[in-house]
Image (cartoon, rainbow, N blue to C red):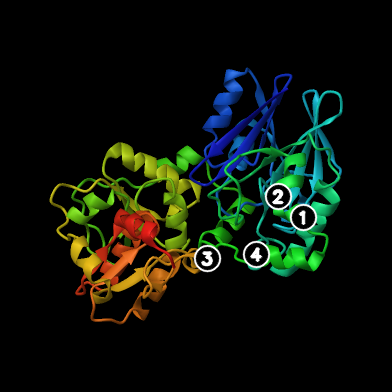
Amino acid sequence: MKIEQFYDKALGHGSYAILSEGEMAVVDPGRDPKPYLDFADTHGARITKIFETHPHADFTSCHLELHQKLGATIYINPKVGVTYPYEPMKDGDEVRVGAVTIKALFTPGHSPDHNSYLLLDEKGLAHSVYTGDSLFVGDVGRPDLREGAGNIQMERASLAKMMYQTIKQVFEPMDNQVIVYPAHGAGSLCGKQMHEETFSTIGEERKQNWAFQFDDEQDFVNALLEDQPFIPKYFPADVEMNRAGVPAFQHSINEVPRLDPGTELEPQITIVDSRPQAVFKTAHAEGALNIQQGDKFETWLGAILNPDESFYLLAESQDELQSVIAKVAKIGYEKNIKGAMVPGEGQFDQNGTSIDLSSFKQNPEAYFILDIRNQPEFKAEQFFHHAVNIPLHQLRERAQEIVTEKPVVVHCAGGYRSAAGYSILSSAFPNHTIFDLSDAVKEFAEQSTV
């Protein structure tokens, strides 16, 4: 038996291969099937089974593509209500993979249709549990994503109660040595305080995971519902895409229209410019949004743009363009790309303004300071006592709330988000002075005592 974890740091997503006697199962695969196909080829194995814990909200899955290409069987809880071919896995059902057994455990709480999968080794002993979005390292899955999405929709308080029962009845009785392999880790928005480690054991979680420390259901519910992160716009759409199955990854990428440099872009169509902020500020299209290619590009694209919003996609080079299209596809937005392009030299003439830091430090009161961090970040610590908080994911819709004659300075925690916020405000107020504090904010963060 061999187990391999595939970890996508950008989405904080963990998926798994379970290999035994030439047969391989995949648990919660991401959009690109290549890592799983390559791993199977390297080990002379056949991918015969795919186990889905639930319809994920934060990424699209290649389960249907693997089924169509390889004939692999997809296993999932029938409550999900999928429209693709599958075999139902109800609580206690078992499936063989070579010499090992996969046993379904019904673990609702994050969603009402959630399975975890217990791996029994060649001797029938519990070896590891693939917990999806139910149990994380240091946390449990958020219960507020299925109030308006999925085959079964349920209020967050009811799901939080289900999560309490899942912890008490399913995970607490397990042996300490059982390895916990979750679908997410730190950086994912599917929980609120996941640890950096990408796997653990039941024994470790019983000691250090806050969710195991409660003996009162209502106290647990209150703690779970408090301070959950925001819900990106794309989350409900991805639940539905995963219930139906998405097109083959490479084929869908190849279908994205490529535009020649210098192509005139249609007005009124959103432009997403993924180039570095320094390049963007040198010359960019009027009204373009600067969502820089980086570790969090996928999340912020899906947080800022609506799931049915068409857009042009720009990048600094052809290699960067190919890379960023693949990132777009991980959340199922590639179908919205009206055209992808590397801008021609001199094609755009909009440029940005740079803040005079010394002047700002001497008199910050002369500026309207906009903090675009998320609300829990703002509540925990403020870098400027007179800053106004509008989180980045709400900024396009709420920009008109900013009424001031002062120059506007936008900041986040480290400089990545503020580039996007700066571009949104520059588009909303083309005749107003907008500054991006960028990574200089770190100096003020270090001095903050608020």
Q: Which is more N-terminal, label 4 or label 1? A: 4
Does residue 5 sit above or below 310 in this rendering?
A: above
Residue 357: where, in percent of width, then height? Answer: 21, 61
CA separation in Å, label 4 and label 2? 20 Å
Q: Kindly identify the amino acid type of the residue bearing the numbered disc 4.
A: Asp
Residues under numbered marks 2 and 1 in contact, where contact means CB atoms less than 8 Å apart = yes
CA separation in Å, label 3 and label 1? 23 Å
For disc 2, the marked residue is 209
Q: How many neighbours does mark 4 have within 10 angstroms: few (below 14), some (14-19), or many (20 or more)?
A: many
Q: Is residue 250 left or right of residue 341?
A: right
For disc 1, the marked residue is 213
Q: Which is more N-terminal, label 2 or label 4? A: 4
CA separation in Å, label 2 and label 1? 7 Å
Q: Secondary structure at mark 4?
A: loop
Residues under numbered marks 3 and 2 in contact, where contact means CB atoms less than 8 Å apart = no
Dot in front, 1 or 4: 1
CA separation in Å, label 3 and label 2? 21 Å
Q: Kindly identify the amino acid type of the residue bearing the numbered disc 3.
A: Pro
Q: Quadrant of the C terminus?
A: bottom left
For disc 4, the marked residue is 144
Q: Kindly identify the amino acid type of the residue bearing the numbered disc 1.
A: Gln
